[in-house]
Amino acid sequence: MKVISTEAVQAVHFDSEIARGVTGRVIIGQGDGANNFCMRRFDLAPGGHTPRHAHAWEHEIFFHAGEGEVYQAGAWVRVGPGDAVFVPRDEEHQIRNAGAMPLTFVCLVPAGAPEI
């Protein structure tokens, strides 16, 4: 069993036109013996966004703090604390911070997908 503060996990920062103001952390992954899923935490700075992309695996997202928007089928959908999103495989998607505070979310991906 692993019990850890998500703040204690080493952060990876992304800041480019493709991914602006993104901090990612692998909370539970292959290195922990997780053979089926990887749990990741992301924090988007105000004005930050993930890349618009699609991939061959589904994933699930839980929004913990802040206000954001998720790109879905050509439109932006508002999300906030307590909201969850299911992204089917091969669906184009993107997340952006729509507020003045950091947007924090947890994302689960299956084993074999990039951990970060």
Image: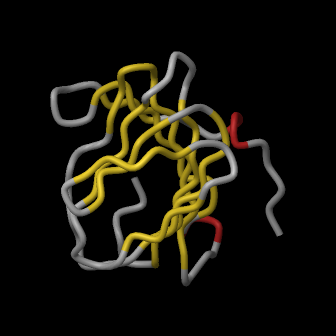
Name of the residue lying farthest toward the top:
100
Q: Residue at x 58, y 53 (%)?
A: 106
Q: Position of residue 88 (x, y in %)?
A: 35, 77
Q: Position of residue 91 (x, y in %)?
A: 24, 71
Q: Is residue 116 left or right of residue 2?
A: left
Q: Residue at x 41, y 42 (%)?
A: 69
Q: Is residue 93 left or right of residue 32?
A: left
Q: Position of residue 9 (x, y in %)?
A: 64, 40
| Quadrant of the image occupied by residue 103 | top right
Q: Is residue 39 above or below residue 113?
A: above
Front one among 59 and 93: 93
Name of the residue lying farthest toward the bottom:
36
| Coloring scheme used | secondary structure
| Quadrant of the image occupied by residue 97 | top left
Front one among 95 and 106: 95
Q: Position of residue 79 (x, y in %)?
A: 52, 46
Front one among 19 and 63: 63
Q: Residue at x 40, y 50 (%)?
A: 77
